[in-house]
Image (tube, helix red, strand yellow):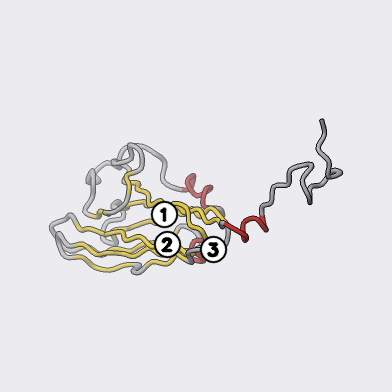
Amino acid sequence: VAGAALGSSLPPAGPVASGAPPLGRLGVRHCTLAEDEEELRRFEVNLGYVDSAQQTSKEHEMTIVNHGQGGLRWAIDLTDGIAAQWLDLGARGGELAPGAEQAVRITALARDLAVRDTFLLVRNLDDVRDIVVVRVRMQVGAEGSRASAIFAVRVEGQPGARGGGRARA
């Protein structure tokens, strides 16, 4: 399943479920809040463009936070199996004391030319209503000779162009 199609598999937009804390005990830092999505607790990590000829990976550090008064057990789930091929998480779960936080390194591999897009579900294992959704995106391209070998633009009338090799008036 492609990452772009996964957006439809997330819970529908709307108010927080009745009885749920408006912002829960579980939180994340170093992520961008998705447009007007604070109540739904949806965030984004956009790693931007990576030139695969120059970099083999790109890293970002996200922080998991316990805003509650008691301990919190948390876990991160990838929403698709394809993401496991290009995305590595420094930690997939743990426990946090009240007010504590833990850094999680996100490493995205830049092996193939592609637009990478997936969702992480950061879950409070002690409260099923306490979930944070983090979208991770990255575009992998190639500059220089590698890109021109794959994507070449031939102008009619120039050497190597198809269509007779002569410019038309």
Of mark 2 and mark 3, the one earlier in the sequence is: 3
Report the number of discs. 3
The residue where tag 3 is placed is 53
Of mark 1 and mark 3, the one earlier in the sequence is: 1
- Asked if labels 3 and 2 touch by Cβ distance under 8 angstroms, the answer is no
Left or right relative to 159: residue 33: left
Crowd band around label 1 with a 10 angstrom C-alpha radius: few (<14), some (14–19), many (20+)? some
Crowd band around label 3 with a 10 angstrom C-alpha radius: few (<14), some (14–19), many (20+)? some
Vertical order, 165 against 69 (above or below): above
The residue where tag 2 is placed is 58
Q: Residue at x 46, y 57 (%)?
A: 79
Residue at the extreme left of the image, as rendered: 69
Mark 1 residue type = Leu
- Asked if labels 2 and 1 touch by Cβ distance under 8 angstroms, the answer is yes
Vertical order, 73 against 159 (above or below): below
The residue where tag 1 is placed is 47
Q: Where is residue 11 drawn, in percent x and y?
A: 41, 45
Q: Where is residue 18 drawn, in percent x and y?
A: 27, 41
Q: Secondary structure at mark 1?
A: strand
**Most foreground residue, 97 or 103:** 103
**Most foreground residue, 35 or 157:** 157
- Tell me which corner region of the image, top left, top right, bottom left or bottom right, holds residue 103: bottom left
